[in-house]
Image: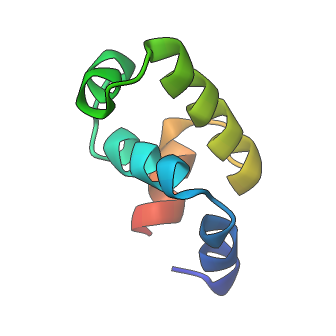
Amino acid sequence: MKLTSIRNINKLSPREKEVAMYIVDGEKTSIISKKLGIKSNTVSTIKSRLFMKLGVDSVVGLYKMIKG
């Protein structure tokens, strides 16, 4: 993982990191919401926010950033 990727990931809140890990593990929004006990809309909002913070525009981009 590149140093810039690590810096970007460190910008995420603990909840954003948690959602990001579920996303890269292939979980759907509805499943993530059930696991975390939050609404699907909240998961979608968190997903949008973490994409913006990391500068990615897709799940594939997120996967590459986190998993390398």
Q: Position of residue 24 (x, y in %)?
A: 36, 46
Q: In which image quadrant can residue 44 be found?
A: top right
Residue at the image position 59 percent from the left and 34 percent from the top: 46
Left or right: 16 in relation to 54: left
Tell me which colouring the rendered structure shows.
rainbow
Left or right: 67 in relation to 43: left
Left or right: 55 in relation to 47: right
Give the total number of marks visible in the rendering. Answer: 0
Where 26 falls versus 45 (above or below)? below
Left or right: 23 in relation to 47: left
Q: Position of residue 55 (x, y in %)?
A: 75, 51
- Of 46 and 6, which appears nearest the observer? 46
Residue at the image position 60 percent from the left and 77 percent from the top: 6
From this viewpoint, which residue is outermost toward the front? 37
Q: Position of residue 29 (x, y in %)?
A: 38, 21
Where 62 falls versus 64 (above or below)? above
From this viewpoint, which residue is outermost toward the bottom? 3
Residue at the image position 49 percent from the left and 48 percent from the top: 15
Q: Quadrant of the C terminus?
A: bottom left
Where 10 falls versus 22 (above or below)? below
Residue at the image position 49 percent from the left and 58 percent from the top: 64
Q: Position of residue 57 (x, y in %)?
A: 67, 37
Where 8 falls versus 29 (above or below)? below
